[in-house]
Image (spheres, coloured by chain):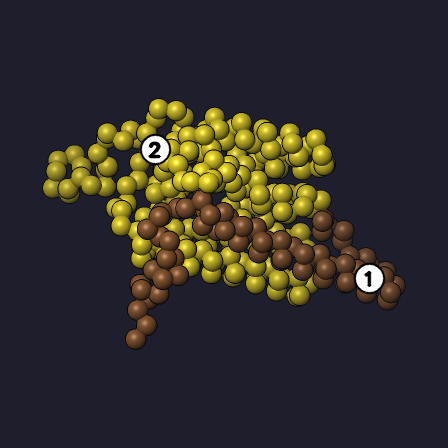
Chain colours: A brown, B yellow
């Protein structure tokens, strides 16, 4: 049977060193990277939708509230 | 606070769509980045006073805002606000110095990982909702935001599960002087408790 505690201790094998700067740096980069990926995807979807609307010549343009 | 800082960046991004998300996110984690920089290459204790105390946060926010304003516009004010909001957010989950020579203050919710998870998840939901409000109600955009929020909450969950396993300290919230006994530790039978 999987021992969750042992698994977590294995994954965080350096936990005995506490908040080692390298671990903290990786932990800080992760959410920033996730935000960057999501924002990039949203901007891509938004510009694709805007292009599509432009080609169709819809009378009602997309609101230009998404920035870079 | 951990993922909550990212949610603060999302909420602030909704205020100024022209401001890129990456510098905003970096600013919201700003004091942590400075602390990491001060701890390289070897861990040093007591760096929090230079990064997470009120004067340090004020100086950091001003420096970050001015640095951003010098290169790009607009949104420098939000960069500074993101940096400033780090302190009250950390006050909920950890214990931080107010200024030099004072005891650490904070609710220390990191010692109650489940409560920390609930709080940070709530902050993520609010941040994502504010971020999504700037879009037209288009399904694919909303789906990305939901996936973003879910990923952030899962990441926080992983951190809190790890904390609950490896944390061996007691919950010691402090909003007063460290010498004062915690109100929570006073026995119920004691008069006036």
Please, what secondary structure does the residue beneath circle 2 have? strand
| Label 2, residues with CA under 10 Å away: few <14, some 14-19, many ≥20 | many
The answer to whether A45 is drawn above or below residue A19 in the figure is below
Task: Depth check: give the residue in front, B104 or B135.
Answer: B104
> Which of the labelled discs sits on residue B47, or is there none?
none
For this rendering, which residue is in front, B51 or B145? Answer: B51
List x then y, in percent, for residue B184.
23, 41
Q: In the rendering, at what x and y percent does residue B134 appear?
A: 67, 52
Closer to us: mark 2 or mark 1? 2
Can residue B87 be seen in the rendering of this structure?
A: no
Q: Position of residue B141 (x, y in %)?
A: 66, 61
Q: 10 Å neighbourhood of mark 1: few (<14), some, or many (≥20)? A: few
Q: Is residue B14 above or below residue B114?
A: above
Q: Secondary structure at mark 1?
A: helix
- Which residue carries the number 2 mark? B104
Q: Residue at x 82, y 62 (%)?
A: A51
Q: In the drawing, what numbered circle is on residue A51?
A: 1
């Amino acid at each position: 049977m999987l021992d969750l505690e042992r698994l977590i201790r294995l994954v965080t094998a350096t936990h005995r060193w506490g908040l080692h700067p390298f671990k903290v740096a990786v932990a800080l980069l992760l959410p920033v990277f996730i935000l960057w990926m999501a924002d990039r995807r949203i901007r891509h979807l938004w510009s694709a939708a805007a292009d599509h609307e432009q080609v169709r010549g819809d009378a009602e343009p997309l609101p230009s509230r998404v920035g870079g | 606070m951990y993922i909550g800082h990212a949610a603060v960046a999302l909420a602030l991004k909704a205020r100024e769509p022209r401001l890129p998300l990456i510098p905003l996110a970096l600013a919201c984690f700003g004091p942590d980045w400075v602390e990491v920089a001060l701890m390289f290459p070897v861990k040093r204790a007591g760096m929090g006073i230079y990064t997470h105390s009120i004067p340090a946060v004020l100086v950091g926010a001003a420096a970050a805002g001015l640095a951003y304003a010098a290169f790009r516009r607009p949104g420098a004010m939000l960069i500074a606000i993101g940096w400033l909001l780090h302190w009250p957010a950390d006050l909920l989950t950890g214990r931080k110095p107010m200024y030099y020579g004072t005891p650490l203050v904070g609710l220390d919710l990191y010692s109650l990982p489940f409560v920390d998870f609930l709080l940070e998840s709530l902050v993520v939901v609010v941040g994502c909702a504010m971020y999504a409000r700037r879009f037209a109600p288009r399904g694919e955009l909303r789906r990305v935001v939901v996936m973003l929020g879910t990923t952030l909450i899962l990441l926080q969950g992983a951190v809190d599960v790890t904390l609950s396993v490896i944390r061996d300290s007691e919950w010691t919230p402090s909003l007063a002087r460290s010498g004062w006994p915690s109100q929570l530790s006073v026995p119920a039978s004691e008069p006036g408790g």
